[in-house]
Amino acid sequence: MRSPDSPPHEVGPGDGGSGERVHHQVTFLVLALATLAYAMLQSLVNPVLPTIQRHLHTTQANVTWVLTAYLLAASIATPVVGRAGDIVGKKKALVAVLVFLAAGTVLAAVAPTIGVMIVARLVQGAGGALLPLAFGIVRDEFPRKDVARAVGTIAALIAVGGGLGIVLAGPIVDSLGYRYLFWIPLVIVVVALIAAVMVVPESKTRAPGRLSAGPAILLTLWLVAVLIAVSEASNWGWGSGRTLGLLALGLALVPVWVLAESRSADPVVDMKMMRVPVVATTNLAALLLGIPMYSVMAFLPEFVQTPRSSGYGFGASITASGLFLLPLTAVMFFFGLWSGRLADRYGSKPVLIAGAVLTAASCGMLTFAHHQRWEIYVATAVVGAGLGFSFSAMSNLIVESVPVTQVGVASGMNANIRTIGGSIGAAVTGTIITSGMSGAGTPLEAGYTHAFLFLFIAAAGTAGASLLIPGAGRLATPSPIGTGAAGGTVLVHNAEAAIIAGAPIVEAE
């Protein structure tokens, strides 16, 4: 077994996990490519839903399912496939996810009806599992000193790909047509799939047990109920029977799911792991961070597209509105890369706090200063810095704080919790914005002002939750091949995570 800081060995393509290992930087390039493609597919359709609605001859209510279907499938696949990867092998799971992502993208590109498009987006949503699988592969394959930077970069690429999709959507549709929103990313997905098969090594670290069907079904049911309710609340009404009924069903199923997981010999999500203070408080921060993260990207383009005759906005086109988010995308990537270096020096907690404070500052600025173009550019740059720090640091905190056999499911649940926060935040923000409408059918400026204030409060809450995260001592001994919950020394970063793994704790020097 090699030391965590010893240089990896070079091999030719096709190493399946036996013998020499592929250089970790080659593996990283494949993961980065796949992550970028998934993130772009997630956001490319957001600004052009009216175009898709027109071409597929459907209603506004139906076309919103192009977003909702993707969200639902990703929320289910992220923890379940993340856990499956921990058990059967992360490379196998990664290849399967890329196959689904490619198949769904082809189907979306040729979809003749809205029904086929929604099915395609459900298949594409399996790509949500890329994030926990990528984090798990990084922790398995990278030298210990490079893990934080690599996780930070991949986390930044998720956020950057989302912003880039919004920026590029307009020019692609204007010059090529909306179907190229799928054909172009498909090329990247196929290249990543071939490269994953050829060069990504299979993990030698496996979790014991199997994937339990009962807890997985219960997890799916409560996630679907809650996410459909909050996603459709703006259409159905918060007080409608459908919204309240689904919310009640979802919330009622949560304790049933927790009980099933606690009693299962092979839980999908280990409840002991979820109660580790670092994990629990980081997940609370993720829930709150999702609110400004998703809402800024969703509603700021609508704000700048509002005609000047409304007394605010800039009358921007789809393409021009995407350019307002360009500072967010560029700065987010830079700060995401920088966050890994800062985490190595100061720890991930201070980086997360700094990110939350910057995000709150940007939302506070948008509350009071949104009438000049430069104000929007400055605010989006600051929120990009905040999200770049926060997203990367949060991912690192989870990866650092759980046993190697639970990285996939733990980071998957963290991503899911952030998505739930984003869904709730987007629904509430949309309700606030549309609470008052002008005679021209556009929201009043006060709606946006109050919405930006709501996002500021959520970001400030993220900073408060981040302060509650306990410090995690760094532990430096990697897990031997084939050990994990069944015993053996496990690379973890706090004593409680080691206790969960049933492993002896080896303190760093």
Image: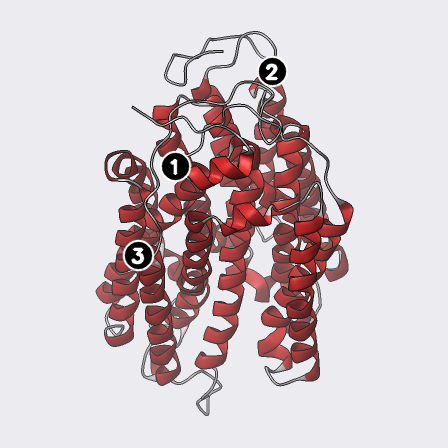
Task: Give the class, few, some or many, for how many residues have Cα within 10 Å of label 3's Cα (few <14, many ≥20).
Answer: some
Q: Foreground: 112 or 380?
A: 380
Q: Secondary structure at mark 2?
A: loop
Callouts 3 and 1 close, C-beta under 8 Å: no
Q: Is residue 246 shown above or below 466?
A: below
Name the residue beneath numbered marker 1.
Answer: 153
Label 2 and label 1: CA atoms lie apart by 24 Å
Residue 449 visible to an observer of this rendering? yes
Task: Give the class, few, some or many, for how many residues have Cα within 10 Å of label 1's Cα (few <14, many ≥20).
Answer: many
Name the residue beneath numbered marker 2.
Answer: 17
Callouts 2 and 1 close, C-beta under 8 Å: no
Please indicate whether residue 90 sits to the left or right of residue 345 in the image: right
Label 2 and label 3: CA atoms lie apart by 40 Å
Residue at point 55% right, 34% down?
Answer: 501
Type of residue at label 1? Thr
Q: Foreground: 35 or 49?
A: 35
Task: Give the class, few, some or many, for how many residues have Cα within 10 Å of label 2's Cα (few <14, many ≥20).
Answer: some
Label 3 and label 1: CA atoms lie apart by 23 Å
Q: Please state the horizontal and vertical placement of residue 165, each as a whole percent of the image.
A: 47, 50
Callouts 2 and 3 close, C-beta under 8 Å: no
Q: Quadrant of the C terminus?
A: top left
Name the residue beneath numbered marker 3.
Answer: 467
Q: Please state the horizontal and vertical placement of residue 375, each as a whole percent of the image.
A: 23, 66
Q: Is residue 178 shown above or below 22?
A: below
Please indicate whether residue 424 sits to the left or right of residue 463 in the image: right
Please indicate whether residue 138 sits to the left or right of residue 269 in the image: left
